[in-house]
């Protein structure tokens, strides 16, 4: 009988997670493995069949009461044989007692509902080269590294269900990542990051007090890309965000459902113009 075991993945094995996600057309960032692993070094589970990696899933713990599932993949040769569901059960066990979130692809959403998840909204991926448009002149865009990290982390916490300082510090500072903040009337009013991906670049998060702040950040982030296409995972419940994407000529290319087990966390949802990632929340 074939031997199947699920163990915690090391940081070097995180490249396997990214490669498989790329094969599924999820288009992860090229250097996501380091900040992802820092978010929770024990949160990535790799399943091996007779020593060969065949399944992946992440079960990342945030704070004391929140968790997020991602990278749920069974390789095509072993699908339908029960190995994927064993990985899923191991991930859910690791997050037992927490409010758990995920971004579910369309074909898996019924399965997630049977596991107790309920849809909060859909994330629609918009892609393209944003049409050039000037934001209001009273918004200043600056390098996020110029801000004291504690201030940036507190701002991020407004939009995310828990603090994630280790992840955030690497997300802002990883090679190839451009992180910007927006200042208006002397106050921090926006934050965004762009990173190189398998195809083009991914923007996330994009937090903004208003659509013109989001525009200013997106302009600044796009300016670092030399005309490359960008992709943003936009909550469809944020109507100003959707309108901005359409106004800038970006096209919807992919959709998944943000789902939770214990209800939608209390955050500033109106300020989320793009999620950080569909893999870690």
Image (tube, rainbow, N blue to C red):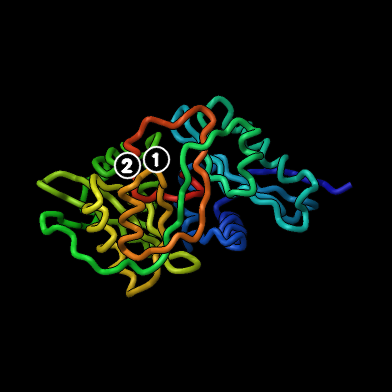
Residues packed near mark 1 inside 10 Å, few (<14), some (14 to 19) or many (20 plus): some
Q: Nearer the viewer, residue 170 or 202?
A: 202
Report x, y in % for residue 198: 50, 67
Asked if residue 107 shows in the view, the reply is: yes
Note whether 1 is above or below 268 in the view shown: below
> Would residue 11 appear left or right of 212 to someone viewing this image?
right
On the image, the x and y values in percent for residue 118 come to 54, 33
Label 1 and label 2: CA atoms lie apart by: 8 Å
Q: Residue furthest bottom?
A: 226
| Mark closest to the chain's N terminus, 1 or 2 | 2
Reading the image, the residue beneath label 1 is: 164
Where residue 156 is drawn, which disc sits there?
2
Residues at discs 1 and 2 in contact (Cβ within 8 Å): yes
Instruction: Please state which of the two labelled residues, at mark 1 or mark 2, is closer to the viewer.
Output: 2
What's the residue at 49%, 61% (across, down)? Answer: 253
Residue 33, placed above or below residue 85? below
Q: Secondary structure at mark 2?
A: helix
Q: Secondary structure at mark 1?
A: loop
Res. 100 mark? none
Q: Is residue 43 visible to the viewer in this orientation of the structure?
A: no
Residue 230 spot, x, y in % from top left: 39, 65
Which of the pair 2/123 is nearer the observer? Answer: 123
The image shows residue 195, relative to residue 85, as above or below, that is below
């Amino acid at each position: 009988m074939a031997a199947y075991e699920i163990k915690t993945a090391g940081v070097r094995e995180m490249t396997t997670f990214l490669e498989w996600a790329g094969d599924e057309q999820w288009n992860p960032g090229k250097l996501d493995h380091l900040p992802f692993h820092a978010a929770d070094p024990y949160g990535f589970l790799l399943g091996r069949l007779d020593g060969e990696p065949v399944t992946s899933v992440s079960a990342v713990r945030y704070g004391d009461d929140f968790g997020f599932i991602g990278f749920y993949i069974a390789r095509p040769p072993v699908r339908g044989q029960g190995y994927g569901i064993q990985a899923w059960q191991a991930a859910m066990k690791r997050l037992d007692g927490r409010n758990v979130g995920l971004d579910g692809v369309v074909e898996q959403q019924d399965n997630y509902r049977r596991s107790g998840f309920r849809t909060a909204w859909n994330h629609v991926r918009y892609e393209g080269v944003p049409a050039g448009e000037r934001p209001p002149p009273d918004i200043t865009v600056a390098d996020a590294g110029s801000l004291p990290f504690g201030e940036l982390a507190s701002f991020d916490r407004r939009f995310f269900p828990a603090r994630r300082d280790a992840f955030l510090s690497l997300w802002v500072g990883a090679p190839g990542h451009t992180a910007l903040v927006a200042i208006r009337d002397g106050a921090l009013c926006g934050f965004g990051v762009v990173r190189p991906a398998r195809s083009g670049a991914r923007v996330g998060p994009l937090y903004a007090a208003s659509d013109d702040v989001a525009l200013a950040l997106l302009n600044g982030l796009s300016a670092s890309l030399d005309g490359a296409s960008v992709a943003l995972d936009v909550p469809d419940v944020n109507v100003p965000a959707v309108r901005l994407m359409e106004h800038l000529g970006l096209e919807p290319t992919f959709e998944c459902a943000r789902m939770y087990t214990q209800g939608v966390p209390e955050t500033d949802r109106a300020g989320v113009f793009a999620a950080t990632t569909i893999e870690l929340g």
